[in-house]
Amino acid sequence: MSLVGIRSANMPDQFETSVLVDFIKNNYANHTVSEIKLAFNMAVQGGLLDVDANAYENFSCQYFGKVFVAYRKWAAQEHNQKIRENEAKETQQDVKKNETVDWSVEWIKLVKQAKNGTIRKEFIPIDLYNWLDKNGKVEYSAKDKWEVLYECLWQYHAEMKAAILMNEQRGILIPGDIKRIIEMIECYVIDQDAVVIDNNPWKRDKAIMSIVTNMSKQEIVRQLAISESLNETE
């Protein structure tokens, strides 16, 4: 306890030590001795926010608890940061892996499906779009891509509304988040003079944009496959 400035004369007596040990066992049994040492070392070094490392000659349960509240907050932030770093590494690894995959065989199969009229957009891998784009086959302008995206948005909207109607007819409860998505797509933000100031609030919704963007990539690949199949026929 000399680490936090407790002199021998002010050390907890036998009863106080027993109370402190019971307090630690009941509330911090999931922490190791090493963690306890780390928490107090960090507190003394000023590495923990919102806690005064000075025990003021009183190493009590309250003091121990204050240090560990700050330590747990720091540990949670560190844990979340490591999760984010690991996710970023995994994403980078996935990107590198996909960049090295040759999708030419799948592309040939898809063109054949387009020629036979059996192509199914919903089964087209998104990575196939990325491969085509990397190889310069996606010759769509930004405007063209947005037009495809808008078409897919309303396709998604129609599919969702049809699903809602079917579930309502069956007496199935509709999740609130699905209703929210429909309302978001249909929403128009209007000012006091009834002038539309933002008719695309869904663009700021990550869930909608992720779904519709993937749908638009699949649609572009479908269009490219059909075009390729027609060129082969000629």
Image (cartoon, helix red, strand yellow):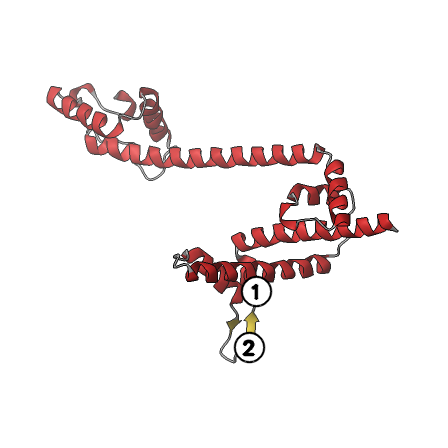
Task: Name above or below for residue 48 compared with residue 36.
Answer: below
Could you tell me residue 190's position as x and y percent? 51, 74
Seen from this angle, which residue lies furthest left? Answer: 15
Dot 1 and dot 2 residues touching (CB under 8 Å): no
Tell me what residue is drawn at x 57 percent, y 58 percent: 156
Residue 55 appears in the rendering = no
Residue 200: assigned label: 1
Seen from this angle, which residue lies furthest right? Answer: 234
In this orientation, which residue lies closer to the viewer: 150 or 87? 150
Could you tell me residue 16's position as x and y percent? 13, 24
Amino acid on which disc 2 is placed: Val
What is the secondary structure assignment of the residue under circle 1? Answer: loop
Marks 1 and 2, Cα distance to the nearest angstrom? 14 Å
In the image, taking residue 217 as reference, residue 31 lies left or right, namely: left
Tell me what residue is drawn at x 51 percent, y 62 percent: 161
Could you tell me residue 3's position as x and y percent? 29, 22
Tell me what residue is drawn at x 16 percent, y 22 percent: 17
Task: Name above or below for residue 221 compared with residue 170.
Answer: above
**The quadrant where residue 169 appears:** bottom left
Residue 195: assigned label: 2
Task: Name above or below for residue 43 compared with residue 165.
Answer: above
Seen from this angle, which residue lies furthest bottom? Answer: 193
Amino acid on which disc 1 is placed: Asn
